[in-house]
Amino acid sequence: MPRGRRISLLGAGLIGTFYTMTIHGPRSRDRVWTVCAATDAEASAFAAKWGIPHSTADIVKAVEDPETDLVVVGLPNNLHKTAVLAAARAGKPVLCTKPLGRTAAEALEICEAVDKAGVFAGYLEDLVYTPKTLKALESVRRGALGRILWVRSRETHPGPHSAWFWDKEIAGGGAIVDMGCHCIEIIRSFVGKDVRPVEVLCTADTLVHPIQAEDSGLGLIRFESRAIGQFEVNWTFRGGMDLRDEVAGTEGSIRLDHFLRTGFEMFTAVGQGGYVAEKAEGDKGWLFPVGDEVHALGYVHMFADMFDALDEGRAPRETFADGYIVNAVIDACYRSAAAKRWEPVELAAWNGAGAGPEAEEAPPHAPEGERYILIKEERMPDGRIKRIVKDRETGEISQGSLED
Amino acid sequence: MPRGRRISLLGAGLIGTFYTMTIHGPRSRDRVWTVCAATDAEASAFAAKWGIPHSTADIVKAVEDPETDLVVVGLPNNLHKTAVLAAARAGKPVLCTKPLGRTAAEALEICEAVDKAGVFAGYLEDLVYTPKTLKALESVRRGALGRILWVRSRETHPGPHSAWFWDKEIAGGGAIVDMGCHCIEIIRSFVGKDVRPVEVLCTADTLVHPIQAEDSGLGLIRFESRAIGQFEVNWTFRGGMDLRDEVAGTEGSIRLDHFLRTGFEMFTAVGQGGYVAEKAEGDKGWLFPVGDEVHALGYVHMFADMFDALDEGRAPRETFADGYIVNAVIDACYRSAAAKRWEPVELAAWNGAGAGPEAEEAPPHAPEGERYILIKEERMPDGRIKRIVKDRETGEISQGSLED
Amino acid sequence: MPRGRRISLLGAGLIGTFYTMTIHGPRSRDRVWTVCAATDAEASAFAAKWGIPHSTADIVKAVEDPETDLVVVGLPNNLHKTAVLAAARAGKPVLCTKPLGRTAAEALEICEAVDKAGVFAGYLEDLVYTPKTLKALESVRRGALGRILWVRSRETHPGPHSAWFWDKEIAGGGAIVDMGCHCIEIIRSFVGKDVRPVEVLCTADTLVHPIQAEDSGLGLIRFESRAIGQFEVNWTFRGGMDLRDEVAGTEGSIRLDHFLRTGFEMFTAVGQGGYVAEKAEGDKGWLFPVGDEVHALGYVHMFADMFDALDEGRAPRETFADGYIVNAVIDACYRSAAAKRWEPVELAAWNGAGAGPEAEEAPPHAPEGERYILIKEERMPDGRIKRIVKDRETGEISQGSLED
Amino acid sequence: MPRGRRISLLGAGLIGTFYTMTIHGPRSRDRVWTVCAATDAEASAFAAKWGIPHSTADIVKAVEDPETDLVVVGLPNNLHKTAVLAAARAGKPVLCTKPLGRTAAEALEICEAVDKAGVFAGYLEDLVYTPKTLKALESVRRGALGRILWVRSRETHPGPHSAWFWDKEIAGGGAIVDMGCHCIEIIRSFVGKDVRPVEVLCTADTLVHPIQAEDSGLGLIRFESRAIGQFEVNWTFRGGMDLRDEVAGTEGSIRLDHFLRTGFEMFTAVGQGGYVAEKAEGDKGWLFPVGDEVHALGYVHMFADMFDALDEGRAPRETFADGYIVNAVIDACYRSAAAKRWEPVELAAWNGAGAGPEAEEAPPHAPEGERYILIKEERMPDGRIKRIVKDRETGEISQGSLED
């Protein structure tokens, strides 16, 4: 029978809860063995709730527990470096939640530490692993959408659930660092992770909340293939948590709705008491619950890929190198928002294949020797088909009708 | 670390495939240990594909494998009894796919065999376990919909994927026995499994396919609480697999879409080659893929409940007694379709609590002492609120307007 | 320039309001010239509000106004006969809201009166005229769905807005007579209005409200072509007004959502004050407004067809004969609900072509001379195409796989 | 009875067809009296088809027809100035299709001509008039969304239907000038037309088609109120015509889908022959027809507002001044795309009220005297409510839990 993993979990907040729910999920063979929280009391309460044998408030002690196989970091952003470096020192495989660092510099330091230590490292970017995203990525890989032109990733809700997110120093920024990191990696996954992000344009503002960090951000990312990624993040959205992606290519398009419109709609005049779904507003009227949140948010397939990769001695889908690129894009976003212009994405190293075959690809042509290039064909309300062509020699554009 | 289960799987068709995908799912601790198919060649091919150590074409041999913990039956309907009885004889826990029997008589025989043998038995009704259904059932349990009045369950597609389904003798019927069994148990779950189904009205026809069994069926089930269940099943639907449920209560309503509208839409002009989703028609144009089919169809939570129940010594959510009631309702449906009238549901025994508290519940009343009972309040296009009341003494109904 | 119509409108309630909004709609050339309400005060208030030159509380006076071209009846059900007979006596074209009568006998009397008087008569069944329904009917006419097998029409809300609807004597029944009339005519339109409705099965109950009439009804209608219509009506639905239709044929299917899911979704934490949409519940949280209600509900295209028909000397899409058939189906429904079995639809006369070409049509066959009839083809998860065939001689069903 | 209008229509292409369908719509009192097309033959064929009494290929002759009340310009962009100036010279009311000019300079010249002539002028921006948009704007006006923060308008399809659109010289640009004009005015309408657009950021590219103009554009518009508008336009979208708007405010949000998801879904294996909906791709598989296109696209309410405004001596909702501002924003977009930075919107004059009250509005504060400002409240999966607050004095952010 397959052997499970014993985990040292650092962090006992909402993300630690979701991680534990997943690791201890239906018929799972893995278990959290040691949990580390801010205080002994919090740690032992969490351990009791989830049936975890050991608890502590000491990060190093949790990391170095000789009975655990790997370390999972689910701490506030300012502690990622400390935690990963401790794991590297202990020679233990380590998985770190998003964003990898607060800045690309911090992420690079983290990458170098695990590289030097030679430990397995995985970047816990859950939203790339949602079942819908994985299936959509497979369709894109098989060519269903042709060449990718544009990707939109939207993540908005009324604001995060823990105090530290709202503190610019601890978090490294506001909505962009919190949620933009998801969007950027979703965009990279659809555009092709071997296609280099070249430059970004970003605008950020604090529109609603009494905080120093931005609560709203919009960004464009231009890739070497000329594809454009577009992210929209804010902590000002009203109506729940809105997670949506759209992908457009030369041959097709995809719409994903991960949270508000998933085929589950409920009206209740009386409410049901308690929790409905993450960041749902209110529990009366029309609500949009999600069947199985940790699954729909990608946690299940993320940990399966990570643990399987570790078992199989391969790299996971999301590595620390990916986390570093995401941080580099975010850094460029903040520079762009300040400078109000496109800013280059600065990467210490680029291992991707470059622009990929897409960059070479010319616009579609008519067969050699034919004079007219077809631009567009469309059926009109009167039933006739209209055809627009370009004269290859004169460049003139003209039209004609076909009876069907 | 938690101990997994070793399974003897009987059946290597699509259902056997879905079961194995689930049992061997992300980080699962359970494994199929022995698979039994119609021929040795099929069995060993299936075993090789899924990494199953043993294979055979002999049901009894598979059941009696001393290294397995339990038997999972995923065979054509005419073999359920044989298989379950073999497991009972072997004193092994047994899980059997839907429908339990081809008739209530067959189901009763199956129930009696496992009762007599004292073995654990679970009814593999996956669609009651979809994450959406489980969450909706919890909302209903917590009162979000008030008293349940009506449930609709719809399951339609262009027809099943294996020859035996189309043979009335082997399957025990057509679309009603194939898919109505899902709908009936979904309906029972929302109405309350302790509320007795009293009578049914059903109509069935063979509208499209050159077969003897019905390819279309519609049924109504009246429960002791006066709730109505309504099922719609057919093998004639065009456009994919349409699995939807609706629930209405005095305080709210729910709509579930399990397959065609789940927040994943794709247009492709070129297709992607190969499989899109179960029973999808075509692979070009607008398609509605499902993120993770075995999860969305309930297999994951079903097997988790079954195996956990076995581990914990408790009954699973779906028992053979449920399977028997479903067969009894189906029997009544066929009688009703023939007789063209409501027919009673005949149950050998009824362990439910009866109609439940609902049956006692009277229509809402105005507070004692008030003369007018409020019937309805509605805001009109001119902004005023209209109020319709009934005079408790005279029975007269009248209306008035409130300025807002 | 085109000449408009001057209308005598009988009834100044919600239906009178919707009719006037439509008749006085964007750039319309028609006008309500005289309005008749229950009292002079109500009539003159309505006239003032809508810029109508004349008002009265006297039905006959309104009908006989020498300056009006036609009579529109928007009165409670118990007054339809009186009003139409007055118009017939006056020799005036008359349009009557749904249902035509409270019973088929009443409807027949109405039909005979206008036939005898030789006046133009139109049945104001708006929901057959929604833009979506008209376009769907055209697709069906052009064969996009093949032979029609099944139609579902659902109309539910929390209950009507005027006192008289709740009074069984005045209305002629409850939810079935109020909303079933819409559903029945929608179903007839999709099945084919020349296809005879043969028998019905109906169940009705009073589940929530303190009234004598049914607040819930479900019915099945079997047509001569073997198509099944299914209607669901109730005054117990929570969450707004739910108007949906589904149509299934041998080659395709259609889903229409007229009110709750039309591409307009709004969340508001504060509300907007006042009216949102007909029978919306609450004005906070997630709401589903409708862009242009009178248009979406079919009023615009209904009156255009009626007035154009009158101008052009042709019959409108919906005639009093249709209204009579609807009443006959409803009568059969009430008989069926009481008798708990299928009941024949009794029609004094049937002018339809009978079952239409559909009834002759046999199930699809393989080309003559070929031994195997194809039953089903499906792509399996492993990418292979499975094919199920029937041996024409032996009747045996078997399967095989094609590599793609 | 109300008096209708007689129109001189310039242009007999798709837009001329939609305009005529609308002007001659259900029970309309208005008529196209003279149509002008590129050739006499086209003009007379159009006239015959639509029952228009007069036709010509001479713009001036059509404009000066003494029997017509007003001129409607539905010509290619390069002819708008010529046509409007002819109307101004003739002293006739004139309505001009979008965009007003190819550049702001051209639009300004057009504005000045009608101002000088003192003729009524309306800007035919149909998508601001869709029934959904009008209703959403009314909700925004009534405060349902609070202060507007962000508006997204998306318009994409596989490319326009007439040759001239594809010619940069005639059209004045590509997708941005063709469809961005719609989006910009939709955004302005939701943000508030009295709020000044300050600067824009735009990126444009020619990704698919063999043309000189851009086939893809993305733009951000920053308003004086700090609201951000975001438009996405392209001629590369696969899957039909995708028209969607989203609006977010401090108290709520709105999603509008005008074309692909309006509550009408059809699957057809065989197709229906002919036209399905504007720019639909294919006529088989799953399709999303629209009930009544000219109504859903805003034409009906647009012409009603224009003609009513003319009748009533008031300004219409969309004026030439609006058209000019749209052109000024587009000009800034092209400058920004070239310069790769934010560019100011240059307006010759600004009559708006400035930023409106929004600009003054400070972020929400706690009542004076209270030390802690509430930042966020959220219900966690364990049912507890978490509360995040800021210390007004120290700026420190902290959290606490409430038992519910």
Image (cartoon, coloured by chain):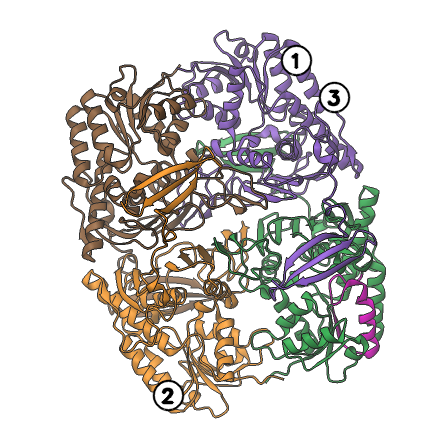
Chain colours: A green, B orange, C brown, D purple
Q: Earlier in the sequence, mark 3 or mark 1?
A: 1
Does residue A135 sit above or below B345 in this rendering? above
Judged by depth in the image, the label closer to the viewer, 2 or 3, is 3
Q: Is residue C194 visible?
A: no
Which secondary structure, mark 1? helix
Query: Residue at left 75%, top 30%?
Result: D345
Which residue is tagged 3?
D349
| Region rendered in magenta | A75-101
Does residue C62 sit above or below C205 in this rendering? above
Residue D236 lies in the magenta stretch: no
Does residue B68 sit above or below A31 in this rendering? below
Q: Nearer the viewer, residue B382 or A266?
A: B382
How many angstroms separate mark 2 from mark 1 (CA)? 94 Å
Which residue is tagged 2?
B86
Q: Residue furthest bottom?
A: B66
Query: Residue at left 67%, top 56%?
Result: A186
Q: Amino acid at mark 3?
A: Ala
Q: Residue furthest front?
A: B369
Disc 1 chain ID: D
Which secondary structure, mark 2? helix
Which secondary structure, mark 3? loop
Q: Which mark identifies residue D115?
A: 1
